[in-house]
Amino acid sequence: MTYQRIRGYLESITQTALNSAGIEKVFFDNVAHSQPDAAESYAEISISFTTIKVDTIGACAGNDNVNGSVSVFIRTPANVGSVLGEEASLSVFGKWCNSADVSLRSFDGPRTISNDDESVHQLYSISAAFFGKLD
């Protein structure tokens, strides 16, 4: 895999999970977007690559281990309860648990992040560490 294949795989399974939970608008790292209106839910996916361990034993070159983290910020309409944000989080965790190409662990969340009085969305944060291989 390459960085982009790992990123694409994580974005794809996460977007599928969010869509199946009713979050239709999903945005990705470094892609410009405008904030949807107050009645719409949406999510942002952020992926960070943290370390790479190069395999130097024998003829195993090209089998590098990559670690990183994936975070998802889910925004739901304010003042409608926590069900949508929590169910979307659970849907993502289910996809991450059954990931075939990239191993995910250390799940965190959903963390409810307080919105101020002027906010039109409630924010939930979920994250996980991942491990993949570069071929």
Image (spheres, rainbow, N blue to C red):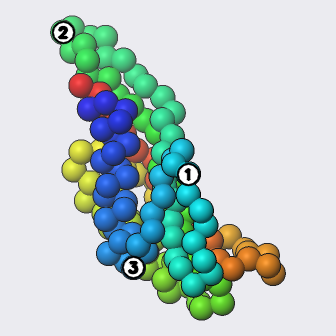
* Kind of residue indicated by mark 2: Ala
- Marker disc for residue 22: 3
Task: Residue lying at the far right in this picture: please name it.
Answer: 117
* Kind of residue indicated by mark 3: Gly
Marks 1 and 3: CB-CB under 8 Å?
no
Residue 69: where, in percent of width, then height?
48, 45
Disc 1 from disc 3: Cα separation: 22 Å
Residue 130: where, in percent of width, then height?
40, 44
Quick check: 95 left or right of 83?
Answer: left
Give the residue drawn at x 53%, y 79%: 40
Give the residue drawn at x 68%, y 70%: 113
Residue 98 in view here: yes
Sequence order check, earlier mark of 2 and 1: 1
Give the residue drawn at x 24%, y 45%: 101
Return the residue at label 2. 59
Give the residue drawn at x 48%, y 29%: 51
Q: Residues within 10 Å of mark 3 (few under 14, many from 20)?
A: some
- Marker disc for residue 32: 1
Q: Secondary structure at mark 1?
A: loop
Q: Which one is nearer the viewer's eye here, 21 or 109?
A: 21
Res. 14 image quadrant: bottom left
- Please, is residue 61 above or below residue 17 in the view? above
Q: Secondary structure at mark 2?
A: loop
Q: Nearer the viewer, mark 1 or mark 3?
A: 1
Marks 2 and 1: CB-CB under 8 Å?
no
Q: How many marks?
A: 3
Q: Residues within 10 Å of mark 1 (few under 14, many from 20)?
A: few
Residue 126 in view here: no
